[in-house]
Image (cartoon, helix red, strand yellow):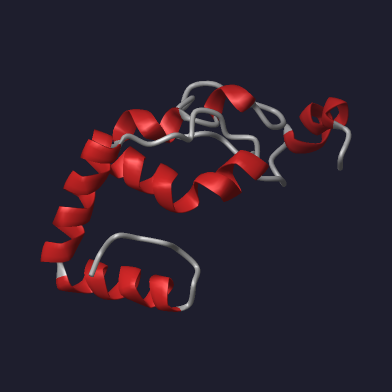
Amino acid sequence: MVNPKKWKKIFNNRFFYLNESAYDQNKKVFGFSLKRNDQWKKHLSLWEVNLINYICGSRMKKLGYQNVNYNRRPLEIGLSIIKKDKLLKKIILYLKEKKLVLVLVT
């Protein structure tokens, strides 16, 4: 399965589901495409992207994502939104307590 050259033959039939991207809906893509790696950022607000980059940045870099830097101002906007939402704040505080994330929410 590691050899992408074989994927088209294996997955292009009625018995196997081909992983299709929501961003390339009219195009079948066989294998992994780095072009699709950052497409999700186009569908989120600036503070959401910065918050994700802040929380997940080190892991994302290890997985090959690029441009995982964050800007402090949009991050602060996102954190203020989280502070106002009881459930989101509870989740972030739990993650902080378990040392899974370092976040400025208190």
Please tell me which residue lies in front, 18 or 69: 69
Q: Is residue 29 above or below residue 72?
A: above
In the drawing, does residue 73 fall left or right of residue 61?
left
Number of numbered discs on residues: 0
The quadrant of the rendering that contains the N terminus is top right
Q: Residue at x 48, y 77 (%)?
A: 98
> Is 88 displayed left or right of 60 in the figure?
left
x and y percent of residue 101 in the render? Answer: 45, 63
- Where residue 31 appears, as percent x and y from the top left, is 72, 31
Q: Residue furthest left?
A: 84
Drawn side of residue 41 relative to residue 14, left or right = left
Q: In front: 14, or 79?
A: 79
The answer to whether 38 is drawn above or below residue 78 in the figure is above
Residue 66 in sight in this render: yes
Kindly indicate the quadrant of the structure image that contains residue 35: top right
Tell me what residue is drawn at x 31 percent, y 33 percent.
Answer: 43
Q: Position of residue 93 (x, y in %)?
A: 32, 73
**Which quadrant does the C terminus fall into?**
bottom left
Q: Is residue 53 above or below residue 35?
A: below
Q: Residue at position x 38%, y 36% from top? A: 70
Most foreground residue, 35 or 31: 35
The reply to whether residue 28 is visible in this rendering is no
The one of 64 and 29 positioned closer to us in this rendering: 64
**x 41%, y 78%: residue:** 97
Corner quadrant of residue 84: bottom left
Say if 78 sits above or below 31 in the image: below
Find residue 85 and report its horizontal and vertical position in percent: 14, 66
